[in-house]
Amino acid sequence: MGALKLENLHYTYEDYKLWKGDWELFDGIAVAMSPAPMRKHQSIASEIIYSIREQLDDCELCEVLGEVDYKIDEDTVLRPDIVLTCGEENDAYLTKAPEIILEIISKSTAKRDEVYKFDIYEAEKVKYYVIIYPDDLRAKIYKLDDKKYDKQGDFFRESYLFEETTCNVKLDFEKVFKRFRNKKV
């Protein structure tokens, strides 16, 4: 019996729902996710989720979520690290473009996050895309300007107000990265 050539297969969301483990689906191509993120990755994600969640007390339309499926179409399903979504009505997965997506880079996901997901999020009109570099304690923020992302800057200790969201939220990167400044995790 010959080997199965996975690169010739085209998968859909119906296939994706049946898989065990952690996967993403890029234009019908199954992509295995890395093992569980490192502690530093998880800790930074927790800080960001907590910071955003605190600001949503008076905003019933929006919610911040970690690692939720974002179904773009039948053959593309991504799982961002963190999203701010507003007005989403589907309980199973996201169907609308989140207002903010944050991805925390690891060596194994860098190209996927910086190139493939960047292009997809831009095409889907995600208002803000934030790429976090835990080794550098740096965040790159991109804002959708018409149809293209415009880099807002590199943030190490600064704050950034996401003004064009339903519930304006702010991230203070001094606070997000504080516990890692003089510590190895």
Image: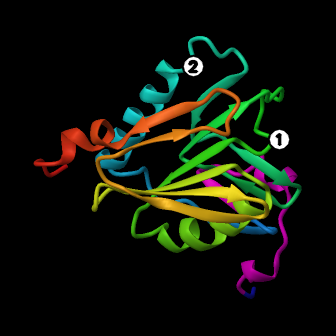
Q: Position of residue 132 (x, y in %)?
A: 42, 55
All told, the count of numbered labels is 2
Residue 43 figure quarter: top left
Amino acid on which disc 1 is placed? Thr
- Which mark is on residue 56? 2
Which quadrant does the N terminus fall into? Answer: bottom right
Q: Residue at x 40, y 63 (%)?
A: 106
Say whether residue 70 is left or right of residue 171. right
Q: Residues within 10 Å of mark 2 (few under 14, many from 20)?
A: some
Residue bounds of the magenta highlight: 3-25
Vertical order, 15 against 171 (above or below): below
Q: Are marks 1 and 2 in contact (CB under 8 Å)?
A: no
Q: Position of residue 46 (x, y in %)?
A: 40, 34
Q: Residue at x 76, y 37 (%)?
A: 93
Residue at the extreme left of the image, as rendered: 182
Say whether residue 135 is left or right of residue 122. left
Q: Is residue 117 visible?
A: no
